[in-house]
Image (cartoon, rainbow, N blue to C red):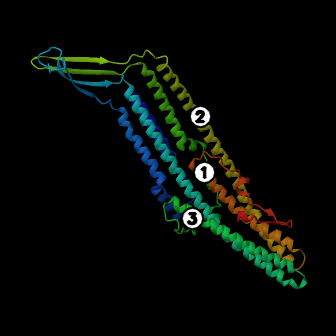
Amino acid sequence: MRKAVVLCVLALNRSAWAQAASPVLPTDATLTKLIADSLTARPEVAQAKAVAHANQERVSQVGALPDPMLQIGIQNDGFRSIEIGRMDTSFLSVMASQTFPWPGKLQLREDAAKLGASQTLKAVARLQLSTEADVRREYLDLVLVRDRLVLLDQLEVIWRRSRDVAQSRYATGAQSDVLRAQLELNRIEQRRFALQAREQSRAQALNRLSVHPLADAIDTSATHVRDLAVLAPLERVFSSQHALARSPELAAARLGTTRANNALSLAEKSYYPDLTVSAGIMYRGQLPAMWLATVAGPLPIFAGAKQNRAVAENEAWLGAAKNEVSALEQLLLLRSEERRVAFSSLRKEVALYQQALLVQSAATSESTLAQYAVGKLPFASVLEANAGYIADQEAYLETVAAAHRLLIAEVEVSLAASPMPLEAANSSAMTTTGNGQSEASPSSM
């Protein structure tokens, strides 16, 4: 009966897992292949599967009877000669014994081993979810850094135009403006070196995850961060109930509760002895043979220090397992809701960038440069406008990327806290230069 209950629990877990299939996130052919290669060839996944297989192989071992004992011996009167056949107490003996655990103990042990094997399968599921999420995050970062390189090229064009305007005004005393524009162009080149190094690092990380040669080229031309800015249809990904149904940690903890309950039942049966049945025959030569049959078992006379404490111990473990399930449920609900709230905020930010900030920032940059060309504004205004324009462009890309990182974490059913929108998207906003003007942070580019 107990075995049927355990199998029913496992079947329900598998059914719930199947019903809560992973939501579909944006992808392309390159990303799909990278994920498939990583899940197939990543050593960590193969290691987790091998551990799960090893635990499954333990089930039949735990459920088997102890090995029988075969004993062959001789008993002889005196040391001078073999007295078998002449003395009544001299004989050759062959004895066999078998220990039989108290009814129910073997089944409980086998059920516990099955539950342990199922827990390791949840560890495989966790690694598979995290592997896909790692590949998606690295791919997103690679696309983002390449888009930032494109943005850097746009910034270079803006500063070349600004330098050309400053040069056209050189005769009116704008030599310092020309020098400052050239300085910004050199800083752009400096940032490009850092971005190119980051691009190479992200590509190498992706190749390692997919078990490809580190130097393999990765084509991301089919995807750009701006293409991922349509976020409204993806808000359905966030579901606290799906998180509860799909979490490998919670599934493993629930199995752990059942396993702890089995361990408690086994401890309660420890008061009942395992019985050892023995039988043997004694050969006495010309004298009639003798036989022997015994039943033996331990007496639980130290139950106060052993069996009672074992029951108390397993009651405590069962309580701990139940509390672990409750804690994980609470944490999963919190993390899913945190991500949903953060994603909703980022959606609003993306809409604000699209509808106002990017348009206004571009117009401000163009207008400021035009007014500087006719001498209505100082070059410092051009510096500020250009820095603001490019910072808004970069922050827009990072906001979209931050929203997709939340989606990836939700599908991963991550227990880690996600950064709030201000931390995720606006960390690259603007910094102040030595002369009091603002410019895009080099680290954000």
Residue 230 in the image: state x and y as whole percent.
64, 60
Instruction: Report the front residue among 204 and 389.
Output: 204
Instruction: Report the front residue among 288 and 179.
Output: 288
Image quadrant containing the N terminus: top left
Residue at 63% over, 56% down: 404
**Which residue is disc 2 drawn over?**
326
The kind of residue on which mark 3 rests is Ala
Residue 150 in the image: state x and y as whole percent.
66, 71
Q: Are marks 2 and 1 in contact (CB under 8 Å)?
A: no
Instruction: Report the front residue among 144 and 196.
Output: 196
Left or right, 42 with reference to 387? left
Q: CA distance from mark 2 to mark 3?
A: 40 Å
**Which residue is disc 1 drawn over?**
409
Residue 279, compared with residue 443, is above or below; it is above
**Which residue is disc 3 drawn over?**
203
Q: Is residue 58 visible?
A: yes
Tag 3, which secondary structure? helix
